[in-house]
Amino acid sequence: MVRVPASTGEATPAFLTEALRGSGAIDSTTSVAEVEHERIGVGVGIVGQLARLHLRYEGDAKDAPGSVVLKIPSEFPENRAIGNHFRFYEREGRFYREINEKLPVRTPHCFWNHLDVAGDEYGLLLEDLSNRISLSQIVGADPARAVQALSSLAELHAAWWQSPMLDTLDWMPWLTDPVNLAAGEQYRVSWGRFLEIMGDRLPDGAVRIGERVQAVFEELQLTGTAEAPATVCHGDFRLDNLLFTDGRDDPDGLAVLDWQIAYRGPAVSDVAYFLCQSLAVEVRREHEERLVRGWYERVAASLGGANEIDGYPFDLAWTHYRRAVLGTTVYPVASAGTMDLANERGLELGTVMAQRSFLAALDLRSEELLP
């Protein structure tokens, strides 16, 4: 059995040879002779370690990957405990083992997947997609890229839309499971520090909305899940987790990374999160309804309808979208509790996320939909 290295720097040629042979990426006549380690995601991957491994081979290395990405749990006990508590490592391992190949969206190919829940050992060796285009979440997506992203998201949602197979994914929590509802308490605990850091950067009315949302967060999630059609949701569908190609009409043109917090729940929660976190405010304001309608019609078409989803008219989906926007405010608030103020990029991203989420809720008069 291939053992999981304790750190990405301990990924040896022998380990990589065994892992890649096990997946069929190389045969018994080929070995990894040298490996160059490149740490990635430093300061971002709180609960995990990421490294791009550049490989040199001995033997016939035809079709062997020139580089791969190694993803393993955090080396810090407190961070690893968070990953275990939320079952992030198990979720992503199960994702690649059970449903990755069944999805209509492009994801990294998985060469090696060590999933040992009882032994608390996890590891993934993934396809390196760094040759693709990465867009700045701080700058935000342009309308054409937003259409491209939402089209892929619609295909994911349609594939599992109200499917009875959702009940078989017992490793993937519902949005209303305790592990996800715990975000409400995190919202409340983080609120004071969030205001210390972000208070003077928030738009007028944001504090009022935040105080109201945190008081009823759990009820908001329960109501949204009960009223909207369920599907598989990515849970963190934003530009930092999306990689593009030049071909905007290419069905393989968008690759989606990081499936650790995928959940079963209302599709509009993914849509709201993307539009409120990955578009500049003015771009969202100008194109928002058109983009939501485009996602909706793509789902409808994939389900075999014309421009409308049976039993779920657009007006209702739009109302659910407006309400789901309120839930997106939890992300910048909760992240403030662990924010490193010396990390300039992290602070700038947290500020942008907060401003965009609260402004969206204000623009859409989402307070009207609070329980």
Image (cartoon, rainbow, N blue to C red):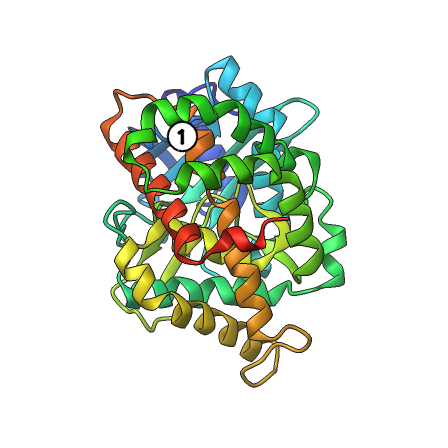
Rendered view: 59 above or below 315: above
Query: Label 1's element?
Result: loop
Residue 31 x, y percent position in the rendering:
39, 36
Residue 62 x, y percent position in the rendering:
34, 52
Picture mark count: 1
Residue 222 visible to the viewer: yes
Q: Quadrant where the N terminus lies?
A: top right
Q: Which residue is mark 1?
A: 45
User: Taking 121 as reference, is 31 left or right?
Assistant: left
**Relative to the observer, which residue lies in front, 198 or 273?**
198
Rendered view: 220 above or below 147: above
Choose top left, top right, bottom left or bottom right for residue 151.
bottom left
Count residues near mark 1 (Cα–Cα under 10 Å), then give few for <14, some for 14-19, many for 20+.
some
**Relative to the observer, which residue lies in front, 204 or 195?**
204
Residue 222 x, y percent position in the rendering:
69, 47
Choose top left, top right, bottom left or bottom right for residue 254.
bottom left
Rendered view: 23 above or below 346: below
**Relative to the observer, which residue lies in front, 113 or 316?**
316
Residue 71 visible to the viewer: no
